[in-house]
Image: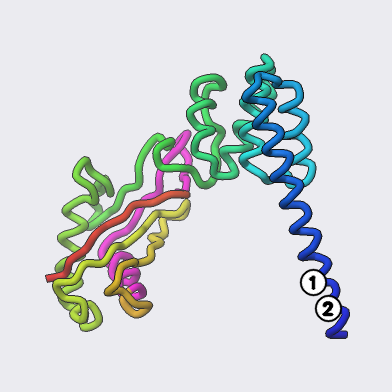
């Protein structure tokens, strides 16, 4: 039985490598054709890639721009929306210029939403992000609460970074980076951020939306 599994895994690896090589070759040929303004052939190459991998966002985006050059605006917009759903941030610019609005997605890049995330403390609602970064009201709450933490005292006067975003349901999701962080510190900060405020997700077309990208907050606890 184990030998059979090894053979299956080995064959799968060969197939995966073969597909990657084929995709790379098709992409190179498609890009060369595009650069020569040979959009008909470029389109053929990009479509071949999508037949192999229907979620290849580079091929989908390139195909969308190729269709645009061929005058097929509706098809281009359909592909651009699909590219955006696959987290291609560059697609947003073309959608706004040629297609109108980005279609609603449960997650989006925060640059494209109608309203940025907010937080609530004592029934008062505040913008989470200001022109200077994270709202000082939330940051002050964080500092007061952090001083009570035995875990965070271990990194006193040392810098760490908290990478965070708010999901569609208003959950605060984060991770810490830096030389002085650890799983224990990471978990402690998650708990504190969730204790000090209630979070409100981004809004797009009057609907809650999560974030693909987030914010980086440098912290030095004194």
Q: Residue at x 52, y 26 (%)?
A: 94
> Is the residue marked by circle 2 packed among few (<14), some (14-19), or many (20+) residues within 10 Å?
few
Apparent side of residue 158 relative to residue 169 in the rendered image (left or right): left
> Is the residue marked by circle 1 packed among few (<14), some (14-19), or many (20+) residues within 10 Å?
few
* Residue that carries the numbered disc 2 in the rendered image: 5
Relative to 88, say whether 134 is above or below: below
- Of residues 165 and 90, the one nearer the viewer is 90
Determine whether the residue tagged by mark 1 lies in a helix, strand or loop: helix
Q: Residue at x 53, y 31 (%)?
A: 102
Q: Quadrant of the C terminus?
A: bottom left
State the count of labels. Answer: 2
Q: Please say whether residue 210 is one of the residues in the magenta stretch.
A: yes
Q: To which quarter of the image does residue 219 belong?
A: bottom left
How far, Cα to Cα, is label 2 from label 1?
Answer: 6 Å
- Of residues 222 and 145, the one nearer the viewer is 222
The residue most toward the top is 71
Relative to 137, say whether 149 is above or below: below
Q: Position of residue 55 (x, y in %)?
A: 68, 46
Question: Over which residues does the magenta segment extend?
Answer: 186-211
Q: Residue at x 47, y 34 (%)?
A: 205
Apparent side of residue 70 relative to residue 175 in the rendered image (left or right): right
**How did the renderer colour the structure?**
rainbow
* Residue that carries the numbered disc 1 in the rendered image: 9
Residue 76 visible (yes or no): no
Q: Residue at x 60, y 31 (%)?
A: 80
Q: Position of residue 85 (x, y in %)?
A: 59, 41
């Amino acid at each position: 039985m184990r030998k059979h599994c090894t053979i299956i895994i080995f064959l799968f690896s060969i197939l995966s490598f073969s597909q990657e090589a084929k995709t790379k070759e098709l992409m190179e040929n498609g890009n060369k054709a595009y650069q020569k303004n040979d959009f008909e052939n470029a389109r053929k190459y990009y479509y071949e890639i999508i037949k192999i991998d229907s979620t290849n966002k580079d091929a989908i985006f390139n195909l969308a721009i190729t269709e645009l050059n061929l005058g097929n605006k509706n098809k281009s917009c359909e592909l651009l929306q699909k590219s955006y759903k696959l987290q291609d941030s560059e697609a947003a610019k073309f959608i706004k210029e040629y297609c109108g609005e980005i279609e609603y997605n449960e997650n989006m890049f925060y640059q494209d939403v109608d309203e940025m995330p907010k937080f609530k403390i004592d029934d008062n609602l505040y913008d989470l992000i200001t022109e200077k970064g994270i709202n000082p009201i939330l940051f002050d709450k964080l500092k007061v609460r952090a001083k009570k933490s035995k875990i965070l005292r271990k990194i006193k006067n040392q810098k760490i970074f908290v990478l965070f975003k708010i999901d569609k349901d208003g959950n605060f999701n984060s991770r810490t980076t830096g030389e002085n962080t650890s799983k224990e510190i990471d978990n402690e900060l998650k708990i504190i951020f969730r204790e000090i405020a209630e979070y409100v997700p981004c809004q797009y077309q009057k609907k809650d939306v999560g974030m693909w990208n987030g914010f980086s907050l440098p912290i030095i606890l004194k």
